[in-house]
């Protein structure tokens, strides 16, 4: 046999692959190194390969004997390490959502961010370790603020990386709960699949900076409402911050970011889904400039209301900020209180159809001019209420600024408070055919001198001019209202227009729907005349209260100025304090058949000398003349037939109060007024010297004569039969009190009346010499219950007081009845409580 001999050499192969990490959480773009150990150590062939289950999620390659794993996009995959003899190990890789920022630790007990509590996220404090060294300060059942449990150095900055979170954010407030974060020096990045960033850094006053690209990997976010609201330390915004996002809601995004000084050009440009930019920079009080094309081609954007409201330092608005915003419809208060804004770009709204421009430039106190074509293309504009209110440096309004905007319904307060405004161009509102109100449109424009006649041409639907030119103290002439046939009110329309000198003929003629001119020309202190037919044909007019009150230069009234005004019911204070008005046309009120009261109508018309016969003939339904001519200190002549047609008159209270020149009263003045029930203070403080005995003979229904002739210092006698017809009169309080010249009172003055109260009847009549028991010559007046101060200070009063006391057995109030009546025969015998208020 032959034998072969072999030498067998043993081979040592890998039996195990040991890795430094078997699980990796990576952010997209992040890379981590995994070390590989092949066992046993004496294995002869330690070479290995590496494969990735999905290279779109993560890649792996061998670098210097280790594995470098790089995250690509969010998701999970595995990386397999395999030796040449087939031994392997697997790394589980998750590419996760991440928030990364730099914080400065001012207090170890304060939170560093906010998140949902069920996410199981990790926190890397800058040392590369994904830890769970934190605790929660709950704000709700689901979420709270994250407080580090790791020992951190106060005052030191840390780069924080939060992994595996879709909710981590920097908000400092949730509903009614708030917590102050440690300052965020810089927001580096936020990635993930989250759907919104609403309230992301709400009220985080310590956020200082945002790194460019911070939001480049947030493909699903569509809502940035309140994202950085009240981040008062934030000083800048990266120009491309939102460039890779499609956001629908940017409302309040940077509201209250008071340290921002500029908005970069095109920050929101080409956001096709953006709808709402309301209050986006409201309250950014440090903002100085807005870059060009800020909202360029935001084709769906509708709402820009309050966008820059309160940006008090804003001085420069870039060009084309709204170009391509073809859906924009709301600009209410967009630039309100931008007090440093000097100039508006002429093309600002060139591509904007418009809608509401309410208060758009309100209180822009540095603005001096408005581009002529600013709103020319805003064909859908519907509301300009208060648009330029309070623009106190605005000098002029260009012609036709709003011309042809046929859908605008509201111009109320549009230039209210523009105190430097001097001129308003032609056709300002021409063709605004749907405009309904111009209430307070030029309120308190005290420098306004010239308003072109045609500014309201074509305004055929307007219903109110209430307070339109109120306080325009330099205005010298009225505009035309010829096309405004549907107006219902001119109340306060020209109140306090102290330079207005005349009201043109037919100025308001045939305004058939107008119901009120209340206070329309009150205190127009230079107004001299009212032209023919000024209010002619205002057939629905009911109120003329205070219309010309305080027009102290008014001397001329056209007789037909109120012709056809048959529904007027109120003329209270109509010509009050028209102190230059010396005469009245007799037909002034001829057509006022519905008029019921004339309260203070001519009160304090101190130059009015005489009333014409027939002045009130047409006022057949008049019931009250309260204070009508009171204070007319020059009024000396009353026609005897003044009230001949006023048969429904029931009250003449204080009608001629204070007419100190009125000496004679026509005997038949009230003869036709059988329904009068009261003559309270009718002739108080007049110059009347004697009273016709039959003055009240046609007034049997009178119940009260309180103060009727009080203070008539020239009155010397009272006829005995003055109240003979007043069978129902019970009250005679103060009727002749303070009539210092009164000497004689007729016998039995009140004998035919139902008198119960004579308190103060002759109080202060120091010259009265009649016998008390002649004035009251009945044996008894059992109905009288009040005689308080009836003859107080009547030092010359004759007769016996005790006898009078016996005639009024039922008196319950009699203090001071005979105070200082030393001329009485028995003055010293009178009880003290009839002289003073003590026994």
Image (tube, rainbow, N blue to C red):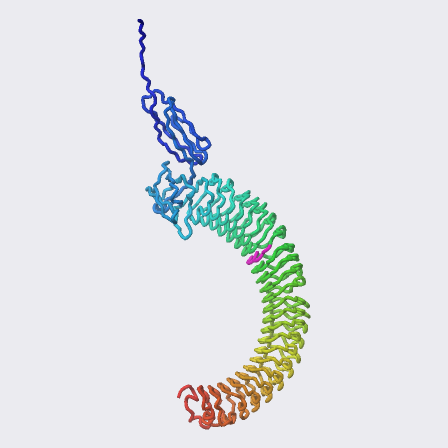
Residue 830 appears at what percent x and percent y? 43, 92
Place residue 265 in its image quadrant: top right
Which quadrant, please, contains the N terminus? top left
Predominant SS of the magenta segment? loop
Q: Looking at the image, how many numbered discs can be counted on the residues?
A: 0
User: Quick check: 384 left or right of 226?
Assistant: right
Residue at 52% from the left image edge and 90% from the top image edge: 768
Residue 658 visible somewhere in the drawing: no
Q: Is residue 515 magenta?
A: no
Residue 166 appears at what percent x and percent y? 43, 42
From what the image shows, is residue 510 above or below residue 820? above
Q: Residue furthest top?
A: 1
From what the image shows, is residue 464 above or below residue 565? above
Nearer the observer, 527 or 194: 194
From what the image shows, is residue 128 above or below residue 470? above
Residue at 48% from the left image edge and 44% from the top image edge: 237
Residue 40 appears at what percent x and percent y? 32, 23
Nearer the observer, 31 or 429: 31
Q: Residue furthest front?
A: 1
Nearer the observer, 253 or 769: 253
Residue 366 appears at what percent x and percent y? 55, 55
From what the image shows, is residue 821 above or below residue 196? below
Which quadrant, please, contains the C terminus? bottom left
Q: Is residue 384 magenta?
A: yes
Residue 643 visible somewhere in the drawing: yes
Place residue 135 in its image quadrant: top left
Magenta stretch in the rendered image: 382-392
User: Quick check: 657 left or right of 804?
Assistant: right
């Amino acid at each position: 046999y032959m034998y072969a001999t072999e030498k067998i050499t043993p081979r040592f192969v890998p039996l195990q692959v040991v890795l430094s990490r078997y699980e990796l959480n990576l952010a997209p773009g992040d890379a981590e190194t995994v070390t590989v150990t092949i066992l046993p150590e004496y294995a002869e062939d330690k070479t290995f390969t590496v494969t990735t289950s999905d290279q779109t999620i993560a890649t792996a390659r061998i670098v210097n004997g280790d594995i470098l794993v790089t995250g690509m996009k969010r998701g999970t995959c595995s990386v397999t390490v395999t030796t040449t003899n087939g031994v392997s190990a697997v790394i589980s890789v998750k590419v996760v959502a991440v928030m990364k920022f730099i914080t400065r630790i001012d207090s170890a007990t304060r939170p560093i961010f906010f998140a949902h509590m069920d996410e199981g996220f990790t926190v890397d404090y800058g040392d590369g370790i994904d830890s769970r060294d934190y605790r929660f300060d709950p704000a709700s059942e689901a979420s709270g603020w994250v407080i580090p449990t790791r020992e951190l150095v106060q005052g030191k900055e840390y780069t924080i990386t939060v992994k595996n979170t879709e909710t981590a954010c920097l908000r400092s407030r949730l509903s009614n709960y708030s917590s102050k974060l440690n300052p965020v020096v810089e927001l580096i990045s936020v990635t993930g699949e989250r759907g919104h960033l609403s309230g992301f850094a709400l009220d985080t006053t310590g956020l200082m900076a945002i790194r460019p690209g911070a939001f480049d990997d947030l493909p699903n976010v569509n809502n940035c409402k309140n994202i950085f609201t009240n981040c008062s330390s934030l000083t800048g915004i990266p120009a491309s911050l939102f460039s890779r996002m499609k956001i629908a809601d940017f409302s309040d995004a940077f509201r209250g970011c008071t340290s921002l000084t500029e908005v970069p050009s095109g920050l929101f440009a080409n956001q096709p889904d953006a709808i709402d930019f309301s209050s986006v920079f409201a309250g950014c009080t440090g903002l100085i400039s807005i870059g060009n094309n800020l909202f360029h081609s935001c084709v769906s954007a509708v709402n820009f209301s309050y966008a820059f409201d309160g940006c008090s330092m804003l001085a420069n608005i870039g060009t084309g900020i709204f170009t391509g915003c073809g859906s924009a419809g709301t600009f209410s208060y967009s630039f309100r209180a931008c007090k440093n804004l000097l100039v508006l770009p002429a093309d600002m709204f060139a591509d904007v159809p418009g809608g509401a421009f309410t208060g758009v430039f309100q209180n822009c106190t540095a603005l001096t001019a408005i581009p002529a074509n600013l709103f020319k293309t805003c064909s859908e504009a519907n509301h300009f209420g208060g648009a330029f209110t309070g623009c106190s440096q605005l000098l002029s309004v260009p012609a036709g600024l709003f011309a042809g905007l046929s859908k605008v319904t509201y111009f109320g307060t549009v230039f209210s408070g523009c105190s430097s405004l001097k001129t308003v161009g032609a056709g300002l509102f021409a063709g605004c055919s749907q405009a309904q109100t111009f209430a307070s449109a030029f309120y308190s424009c005290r420098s306004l001198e010239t308003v072109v006649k045609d500014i309201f041409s074509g305004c055929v639907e307007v219903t109110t001019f209430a307070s339109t030119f109120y306080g325009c103290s330099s205005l010298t002439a009225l505009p035309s209202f010829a096309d405004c046939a549907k107006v219902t009110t001119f109340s306060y329309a020209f109140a306090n227009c102290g330079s207005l000198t005349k009201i043109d003929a037919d100025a308001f003629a045939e305004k058939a729907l107008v119901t009120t001119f209340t206070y329309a020309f009150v205190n127009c202190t230079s107004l001299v005349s009212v032209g023919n037919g000024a209010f002619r044909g205002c057939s629905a007019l009911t109120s003329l209260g205070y219309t010309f009150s305080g027009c102290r230069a008014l001397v001329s009234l056209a007789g037909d100025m109120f012709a056809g005004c048959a529904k007027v019911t109120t003329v209270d204070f109509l010509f009050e304090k028209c102190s230059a008005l010396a005469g009245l046309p007799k037909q002034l009120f001829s057509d006022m058949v519905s008029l019921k009261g004339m309260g203070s109508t001519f009160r304090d018309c101190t130059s009015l000398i005489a009333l014409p016969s027939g002045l009130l003939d047409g006022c057949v339904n008049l019931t009250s003349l309260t204070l009508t001519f009171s204070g007319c200190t020059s009024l000396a002549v009353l026609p005897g037939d003044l009230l001949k047609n006023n048969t429904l008159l029931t009250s003449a209270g204080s009608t001629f109060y204070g007419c100190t020149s009125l000496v004679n009263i026509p005997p038949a003045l009230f003869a036709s007024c059988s329904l009068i029930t009261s003559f309270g203070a009718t002739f108080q403080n007049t110059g009347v010297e004697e009273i016709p005995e039959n003055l009240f003979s046609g007034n049997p229904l009178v119940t009260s004569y309180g103060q009727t002739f009080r203070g008539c210092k020239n009155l010397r006698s009272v006829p005995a039969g003055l109240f003979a017809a007043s069978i129902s009169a019970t009250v005679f309080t103060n009727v002749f009190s303070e009539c210092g010249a009164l000497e004689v009172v007729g016998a039995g003055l009140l004998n035919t009346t139902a008198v119960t109260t004579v308190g103060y009847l002759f109080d202060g009549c120091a010259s009265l010499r009649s016998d008390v028991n002649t004035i009251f010559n009945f044996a008894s007046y059992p109905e009288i219950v009040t005689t308080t101060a009836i003859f107080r200070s009547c030092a010359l009063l004759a007769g016996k007081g005790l006898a009078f006391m016996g005639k009024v057995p039922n008196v319950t109030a009699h203090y001071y009845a005979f105070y200082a009546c030393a001329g009485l025969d028995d003055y010293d015998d009178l009880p003290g409580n009839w002289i003073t208020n003590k026994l």
